Amino acid sequence: MNVQQPAGYPVGESIDDHQIPFWHNPARRALVYQLAALIITAAIGGYLFHNTVVNLKRQSIATGFGFLEREASFEIGESPIPFSASQSYARALLVGLLNTIKVAVTGVCLSLVLGLFVGICRLSGNWLVARLAALYIEVFQDIPVLLQLFFWYAVFYDSLPPPRLAITPLPGVFLCNRGLIFAVPQDHPAYRAMAAAFLAGCVIVFLLRRWARKRQERTGRIFPVVRTSFGMLLGLPFMVWAGAGFPVAIRVPQLSGFNFSGGMAISPEFTALLLGLVLYTAAFVAEIVRAGIQAVSKGQSEAAMAIGLKPWQIMNLVILPQALRIIIPPLTSQMMNLTKNSSLAVAIGYPDFVSVASTTINQTGQAIEGVAMIMVIYLIMSLITSAFMNWYNRKKAIIER
Amino acid sequence: MKTFGRWGWSVVLAVLVFSPAVFGGTLDDVKAKGYVQVGVNGQLFGFGMPDEKGEWKGLDVDTGRAIAAAIFGNVTKIKFVPLTAVQRFTALQSGEVDVLCRNATWTLSRDTQLGLNFVQVNYYDGQGFMVPKKMNIKSAKQLDGATVCVLPGTTTEQNLADYFRTNNMKMKPVVIDSNTELNKAFFAGRCDSLTSDVSQLAGARSVAPNPADYVILPEVISKEPLAPAVRHGDDQWKDIVNYSVLALIAAEEMGITSKNVDEMLKSTNPEVQRFLGVVPGNGKALGLDEKWAYNIIKLVGNYGEVFERNVGAKTPLALERGLNALWTKGGLMYSPPFK
């Protein structure tokens, strides 16, 4: 049956353009709502800003970022860059930021490795291995991370001896309640050459892998990539070292006064924070990995078995590439969680960004500026993580033809 | 129009939450609430910490109680808010507490830039160092290269850096946010020394696993006048807090204690009569009941009583009166006349 065009409407124009009032048009209604939301948000934001400024003025609290230039006049326990109390707040905050990045990057890498391992163990056919993995996940997921940090920190300072009675598991390595202190080789030009050789090794390995994959696609012959890669990465620097005549001068830490001097030290604060964050986050990563692997249809591994792949090949070549697509998005948020949880550092004395920023806030009274900086820094770190993971996710996504 | 309804509520809520606080004066706010909110330490034995029965004890706590007594004639109309060193000033600025009685050092920058006003000092302190006895250290000058445990965001942290810089010594700070955790780390040997105000060191030592194993070094490296603080811009409230503290001192000067305060009401001394409100005037001037000072002394005691009860010789802290004795006895405690 034909629909009659109502009188008065020119033929060719659609009905809903004219007959239906705009508030019944979902698209336009949405636009109006969004506009309204924007105006209200802007109004509230503007009002809050105005209110804050007025209140600060009334209480005569100083504002602005000028304080960043002033002398910090406090020391920071550990720092990747030289820092002393006579330097500026800006430099102190940079030290805090670097400390945060240090613990976050190390933590993310370690928790991915551990999480992947535990997640795979959780699915192992071996009853004991699977149970142990399950037990690990339950224990570490269920205890608040702050408690875990307190626990690990207490383990370090309570169970380890003072510097004078330090444990020496290996010559030149000392373990005491001031941390793990170990000997480092004395500076020698050969070490820089070795680093260069290592980098060259990385490039060669990268090219070799591409060549090997192409050759395998063409001829079906498998090249032992893993073994040769290890050989390259270790062998090249070793050859350089041998060529330079094996320089072995080492700076052994000496007990002088209260503590060891010379060598490198890893503080108990850093170790406790890293350990706590990694063990906690890895439990979540393991569950994500397990879920991802279980989501890959059983037929895939059966098919892989049928063509005679070994178990590690099934995992590496068939299961993980497919599971990764499911794993990556939730993994991103775990990585961000770890970064954000690192701000609990102040509880156990690791000078991270939040810790240094709170000290700054307290000494200068610039709470709003300080908190704004904390928010911006964590926002930027989250955005970078998320951008990187999205890129990786696109790379790993199924390329549909 | 479910969506509109939700929006409407959001707007109403936003307006309610963010409407400018009507600035009526802290005294009116406190009276309307029915209690005064006092920011205290919460972890500092002798100054502000709940005892095993959950009852708040300490010199700063009693200072807070004196303020409640002055306003309400009742020391239970008070709410203690434990604050960390980092939280304390923000809590006061944002109105979370009405007054801060939390061993805060009165400094120029805090007085000027933080929007705060400090009142009469309720404890004259100075920063010192505590070390384990078995280290055999006699002076802070021997601490070159030491690892030092310190609270974050305190004047202590700066004094520490200053002291080592001036004496050309090196040190490594371990900075932990919580008093309890910091002390635990020190007593477990994570640091060679713990630095803080001497009163705090005594407090920490008194709750140490074995107090006799620790000594406080003789050097006092800074002046730490600890005083309650109020928000900038409310002079009446500042006066009330200030004179509540001064009343404790004045009572000790006049020999009025919680035990003899009722007898002293009959005193013929005009100063005592004015102080206790027998002759009216002082209360009205402050906007309080004429009995305000009487209530403080009756319910809390005078400064000497407060000192002895919380940190004095018979307490585990065993602090000397020292600078905190009355001016007539060689100390710095001095009250302007209550006229």
Image (cartoon, grey):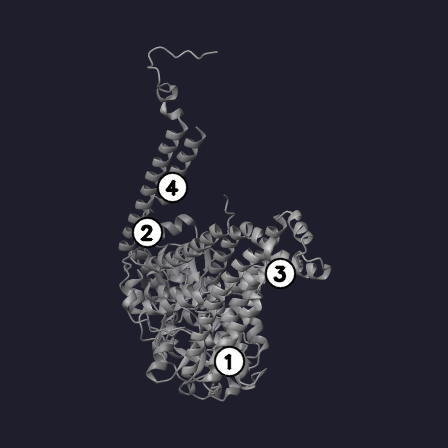
Q: Position of residue B263 (x, y in %)?
A: 43, 65
Location of mark 2 (residue):
B25
- Chain ID for label 1? A
Residue designated by label 1 = A181
Q: Chain of mark 3?
A: A
Q: Is residue B85 visible?
A: no
In the image, are marks 4 and 3 on the same chain?
Answer: no
Which residue occupies the foreground of this view, B334 or B235? Answer: B235
| Mark whose residue sits in front, 1 or 2 | 1
Residue A269, x across and y down, in percent: 50, 71
Residue count near mark 1 (Cα–Cα under 10 Å), binned few <14, some 14–19, many ≥20: many
Q: Which mark is residue B318?
A: none
Determine if marks 2 and 3 fall on one subunit.
Answer: no
Tell me which numbered mark, 4 or 2, is placed earlier along the sequence: 4
Amino acid type shown at disc 2: Gly
Q: Position of residue B14 (x, y in %)?
A: 38, 41
Circle on res. B14? 4
Q: Amino acid at mark 3?
A: Val
Q: Secondary structure at mark 3?
A: helix
Q: Is residue A1 above or below residue A26?
A: above
Mark 3 on the same chain as mark 1? yes
**Residue at far right of view:** A127
Residue A117 falls in image quadrant: bottom right
Q: Position of residue A366 (x, y in %)?
A: 32, 61
